[in-house]
Image (tube, coloured by chain):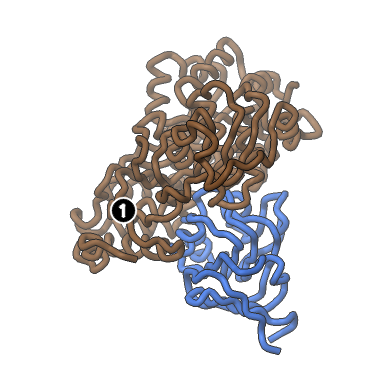
Amino acid sequence: MHLNDAEKAMLDGCAGPVRRQAMEHLLAVGRFFDAETLVPVSQAHVMADTEALGESGVVWLEALATAAPDHRRVVIPTITDPRGADLAQHGRLKQDPSFVDLERRAIVALRTLGVLMADTCINYQTIMAPVFGEHVAFGDTGSAIYANSVCGARTNFEGGPSAIASALTGCAPRYGFHLPEQRRGSTRFHVTDRPDSLSDWGALGGIIGRCMRSYWEVPVITGITGAPTSDEIKHFGAALASYGSTALFHMVGVTPEARSLEPLFAGPAPEAVLTVGRTEIDAFYDSFRPDDDRLDVVVFAAPQLSLHELAALARLLDGRRIHAEVALVVCTSPELRAAALRMGLLATIEASGALLLEGVCFYQMHAREIGIANGWRRLLSNSAKLVNIIGGYGYQPVLAPMDRCVHSAVAGRMVP
Amino acid sequence: MSPTLLRGHPGIGPAVEGIALVAADNFSARYDLDLTRGRFSRPTHALAGQSYVDAILVLNAAKGGVATAWMLREMKARRLSPKALLLNTANPIMAQGAAFAGLALIDRFSVDITAAITTGQFVTVDPASGIVGVHPKGQP
């Protein structure tokens, strides 16, 4: 790879061993994907929950944090994805104290590196959305696909070690979705019925994601009339990224690189490989439909809820009480939990018996262990992303719109 | 009998050898694995219930989220990792995770790697050259 003088100096150790190690990591990844150069990035988003980090990851962060201050501090604005524990409320989930201790150690190390603990996967709704053409290093699939597709920014999936390496060096390997030619459409999908609910949008993302053959495939969606809201396209993108490992989509007439169909492809626009309507969306729900109506836990997360989702949830829960045998868990960012408190939404949500957590996401907080500790197996959510992930943790996930999730939580069983 | 040589893109990590565990399914550490037991835990995965520990794991494509970038290192630290990952198509997360963990990874083979190797075969993996040697079952 061709490096400029500043990059060579970092690789040679002139800026200390931490930046040299970061540069070596970026080059290893860049060479794997035949990157010729590095690209400057303006902000980084670090996924570093301790379930993923484990003890070895935390020890690694702590080692970085022992470097001299001018050698260890990030050089671009850097924030975090959700953490593995809400330090104020972990006891209500019966989280193992050892996980919480690990979390505290990771937080200290990340802060020492100069990372801002935003603890959110919806940084584009709560902190600072990237702008068109901005090169960034985003480390959550939902965040990355939103940045690439909705904002027109440029990023690959940057997992924790790589996002930290970019934060320490200010650059990333120039391959994948940093390159204009990689951003062309490859497969077309046509939508005949506009999704209604957020879970419908997630189902649409899941349907298309299941068709994706690899990270490098870029789906182009036609047929959407009228712009989706930020929350709708958030659920669509998060599910598409989760099911497909997809980092970029184009929605014709909606996303900024898709004003029209033809220029999106290297040649003539292909026919749609799949047409998605109400029948296909209903079939997607059916793929999670259980044989009985038992219910243990209802979860609203993945992605964290926006202020408008919290408001919608508060309206549905107002004056109602969650069934004693069912838990209802809600995850949002620290900023939006504070906003919900200020606006009276938190009081309404918690008066129902629901638990509103901040700075976490359900599947990132040792979901297997909290499921066992609380006796949770049947999980109901309006997140198509969450129901895709959580089966591997021993849950039986079911997908439903938010209103049906709330009605079920109140009834203590899944209601039609 | 000499091994069949399969050529992929030069990869990441050390040269290793071991017994192949193969499926024409995809891979994500967070979505598919029980890291505490070293087994595939996603009920719908083709390898559900099987141990991947010390295997040369041969699968189709990287799927899912970003956690694998951290998790491969933790799996190695717990001595509950595969020896190598051979994929038809990796994504950035697999490459980042392999680089962070020092785990062997090769992808972009000239053939469908999940069809070219069968479970139980002895396999040598050389990421520097991108070459995989596949021995007939029962050898060496």
Q: Tag 1: residue type? A: Cys
**Which residue sits at x=44%, y=33%?**
A256
Pointer 1 residue: A171
**Where residue B126 sits: x, y (%)?**
53, 77
Report whether A3 appears left or right of A60.
Answer: left
Report whether A149 appears left or right of A299.
Answer: left
Residue reaching furthest to the bottom = B1
**Which residue sits at x=28%, y=61%?**
A18
**Where residue A48 sits: x, y (%)?**
42, 48
Residue A92 in view in this figure: no
In the figure, the shade used to draw chain B is: blue
**Which residue sits at x=68%, y=37%?**
A397
**Where residue A269 sits: x, y (%)?**
59, 41
**Image vertical order of residue A140 relative to residue B116, above or below:** above
**Image vertical order of residue A78 relative to residue A354, above or below:** below
Report whether A246 appears left or right of A156.
Answer: right
In the figure, the shade used to draw chain A is: brown
